[in-house]
Image (cartoon, helix red, strand yellow):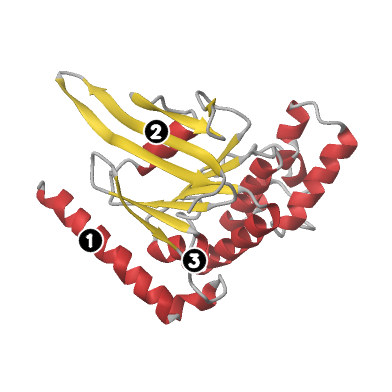
Amino acid sequence: MISVVKLSIRGVSKAFDQPKKQELLALSDISLDIAENEFAIIVGPSGCGKSTLLNIIGGLEEASTGEVLMDGEREASGPGPDRGMVFQNYSLFPWLNVQKNIEFGPKMRGVAPAERQELTRHYIEAVGLTGFEETLPKALSGGMKQRVAIARTMANKPEILLMDEPFGALDAQTRIVMQEMLIRVWQQEKTTVVFVTHDIDEAIMLGTRIYVMSRRPGRIEAVFPVELSCERGHGMLADPQFLAQKKQIMDMLWEQSVAAASGE
């Protein structure tokens, strides 16, 4: 049961115009509530509208119908500092070092130098980049670049962190390291997170609740709370509870993917 609702999605649908064709319905009547401090995961078959839904929450896309509300009352229309986004591509400023990339947002908001330096130091330490403050992005690995991107977004103190497959381009080992880092940051900062992924292991390792979308037009097909007794991290990948929940979600996604491929 959700006690304090941070994000409400009410009847959201999205249709895209197509030249000389019938409009493409990407999302259909999506409604859900995400609790404060929840780590919400969105999974679904390819093309189901996961990223479109995240972009609507972030204000980068406009819903055709429905609304997105913060704290049950504030309409989230257009981009805003209350919603920070992290994408698969790092989008760092190549001419700025790690420290200056992270403090860029607070500087633009007029945060005093001493305060933003302390803020930057805090998030550099949180994502494990101490000692790399003066390093330019070109000298960083993919995982380290994504650490900078996460720290830069968190330094803006968003109420909700929106993440679109942020670890999708990383190798398997680096990906697990990054997942464990993100778990620590989320537990420390107590930020509400909405995270899109196609990786079920990642979904269960990170999420407190998993929202499974149907094939296009995307709808919420099922919601799975993650209530495993094992500690979050790479060790849970072989836990029987983890494997049982993975099979449950995989079976549902397989049905959706087969239906989408066959055009049913």
Q: Is residue 110 visible?
A: yes
Vertical arrangement, residue 224 with respect to residue 80, above or below: below
Q: Is residue 156 left or right of residue 243?
A: right
Q: Which of the numbered marks, if any, corresponds to residue 254?
A: 1
Estimate the x, y position of residue 63 in percent, counting from the top left.
37, 26
Under tag 3, what secondary structure? helix
Q: Is residue 132 visible?
A: no
Other residues around mark 1 within 10 Å, as few (<14) / some (14–19) / many (≥20): few
Vertical arrangement, residue 256 with respect to residue 180, above or below: above
Q: Are marks 3 and 1 in contact (CB under 8 Å)?
A: no
- For disc 2, the marked residue is 10
Vertical arrangement, residue 30 with respect to residue 220, above or below: above
Q: Is residue 200 left or right of residue 252?
A: right
Residue type (three-letter) at the residue carrying disc 3: Met
Residue type (three-letter) at the residue carrying disc 1: Trp
At horizontal 75% and vertical 33% (from top left) the residue drawn is: 106
Estimate the x, y position of residue 249 in percent, counting from the top left.
32, 63
Other residues around mark 2 within 10 Å, as few (<14) / some (14–19) / many (≥20): some
Estimate the x, y position of residue 234 in percent, counting from the top left.
53, 74
Estimate the x, y position of residue 88 in percent, counting from the top left.
49, 47
Under tag 1, what secondary structure? helix
Under tag 2, what secondary structure? strand
